[in-house]
Amino acid sequence: MIIAGGIYKESCVIPEWNAEYGSGGRAAAAVVALCPATILHTYSRTPDSSGLESLRRLGVDVHVQPASHGVAFAYFHPLSHPHVEPPRSSIVQHPPIEVSGEAVLRFGILEGDAIVRANRAVYDPQTSVRPAEFLANGSHAEELALVLNEGESRALTGNTDVRSAALTLLQPGGAAVVVVKAGARGALVAERGGAMTEVPAYRSDRVFKIGTGDVFSSIFALEWAERKLPPAVAAELASRSVAAYCSSGMLPLPTGAPAAREPIVLKRSPVVLLEGSTDTIGRRYVMEEARYSLAELGADVVCPVLDSTPAASPSISAALVIADESRTALQSRVQRMNNAGIPVVVLDEFHSKSATARKRERPLLRITDDFASAIYFALWAASPQHD
């Protein structure tokens, strides 16, 4: 399989993490064990950088077009919006990469563009800010699949309804397949001819979120464009692979079929109670970030300490507690909610060692020391089949 995409430096503060991937590099690393003849076309200021050399050691055939500078993404935590350096408006545009092949995955690239000619192509624009149409730069594919998030589907069509947006993109002369990813709610797969399939997201033991979209697109492209599997089957395998990546944060993905996992059946707008303290600037920041992250993923958030809203509500599906008080007070609070049948997720960065034992004792309780995992666990707890 051929991939055209960027390779960028990436860092995260919490959890501490540094790598050189970008969409193109991560996609190549994800599939190379499954498809040894993986080729990556990219830009780089340093063609022998550690990231590119790592990809070569994995077996990726790397083709580099010179760039005048590098690009870096910095995250505070995996759900935060990254700081990009240099600013996107200052990134120099380079001559386009030209790629031809039987099966090609094309990503949007910050330093330039990729002109693709393929039998089957998969296009992931990587931005909801004026995303370019696949054909706009002269690219051509006998069969085209678009892999988009909800923001990108709205930007390309002006339509806020996902199904209507997909149908617009499937019109004659457009894509043969449109996949619209909806985060914790899975993805919609729309095919020319009218078939629409909802593919669930799957639970993971932990949630490392950086690059999950890249992994989804790479596995979908491998299964649909390279191996010619039906679109819904390819998307299902991509979703399971994302869960495997979330659990470990490691690439390449293991060979063989992805392990069986529990699908997430998420209510359209689950109500999550968020509890914690705001008596220091650090605690206030974590509460604000948690509320924002939950809302971004589609939850209705009830947070008494931030909104002066009542905590008692029959519509509450789950609770997320940011541990910031004595163990006795925390246990009492969790016990009260569990007794009311409300599943509780506790973010406890200091005392999570015995989380497994306590989870066995209380099926409605889950404890984690990781912020991003806590956000997703709270959403999953709000689904009909919680842990």
Image (tube, rainbow, N blue to C red):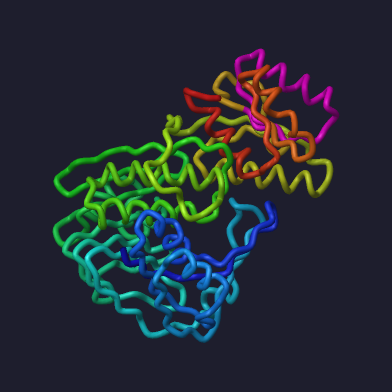
Q: Is residue 339 left or right of residue 165?
A: right
334 in the magenta segment: yes
Quarter the N terminus occupies: bottom left
User: Image height check: is 324 above or below 67?
Assistant: above
Q: Residue at x 75, y 33 (%)?
A: 353
Q: Residue furthest top?
A: 339
108 relative to 211, above or below:
below
Viewport quadrant of the C terminus: top right
Count the labels in the image.
0
Pinpoint residue 109: horizontal percent, then vertical percent.
42, 71
Residue at x 78% of width, y 34% of height: 351
Front-lying residue, 99 or 176: 99
Provide residue 272's location: percent of width, then percent of height: 59, 31
Residue bounds of the magenta highlight: 319-345
Residue 252 relative to residue 19: left or right: left
Q: Is residue 84 left or right of residue 285?
A: left
Front one among 315 and 174: 174
